[in-house]
Image: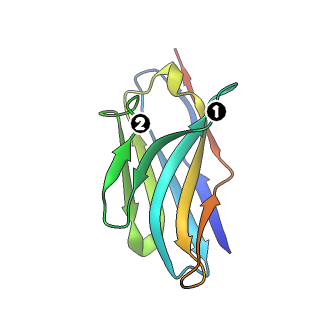
Amino acid sequence: QVQLVESGGGLVQAGGFLRLSCAASGSIFSINAMGWYRQAPGKQREMVAIITSGGGTSYADSVKGRFTISRDNAKNTVYLQMNSLKPEDTAVYYCNVNAEVPRFVHKIYWGKGTLVTVSS
């Protein structure tokens, strides 16, 4: 199994920044894509950013130019640098990992979420 531990959420004023981290641990053979999703109150969960094992990235239009996703493969950790935060970025942010556990068996794992609140 894979455990995902997220950190870095909190309360910030509009225009501020936060950095989220998500560390994966367990009997992991390899990790493919890693990503961040978010769910605001009363809304569906949506993709924020994804990064492949090769470093390719994809972002939601609403965060392009403000958020940056990165990963440290040696630490099995994915980061989300969030700049120029807006009140509409307020949501619970979830880490998502596509891991090979055990070898040849690919599964999707979710973190428990970390709350980001942006005040106006």
Identify which amino acid the numbered label 1 is placed on. Gln
**What residue is pinned by disc 1?**
44
Q: Give the percent coordinates (x, y) of residue 9.
A: 57, 41
Residue type marked 2: Ala
Q: Is residue 68 left or right of residue 89?
A: left
The N terminus, quarter of image:
bottom right
Which residue is drawn at the image coordinates 46% and 22% (left, top)? 86
Question: Pointer 1: residues within 10 angstroms few (<14), some, or many (20+)?
Answer: few
Residue 116 in view in this figure? no
56 and 81: which is toward the camera: 56
Color scheme of the displayed model: rainbow
Cα–Cα span, label 1 and label 2: 14 Å
Location of residue 91 by image quarter: top right
Q: Is residue 40 visible?
A: yes
Q: Nearer the viewer, residue 92 or 7?
A: 92
Residue at the bottom extreme of this rendering: 103
Q: Is residue 3 left or right of residue 73?
A: right
71 above or below 95?
Answer: below
Position above or below: 21 against 54: above
Seen at 37% across and 67% down, the residue is 53
In the rendering, at what x and y percent does residue 69 appear? Answer: 38, 49
- Residue that carries the numbered disc 2 in the rendered image: 60
Residue at image point 59% right, 73% down: 25
Q: Is residue 59 above or below residue 111?
A: above
Name the disc covering residue 97, or none: none
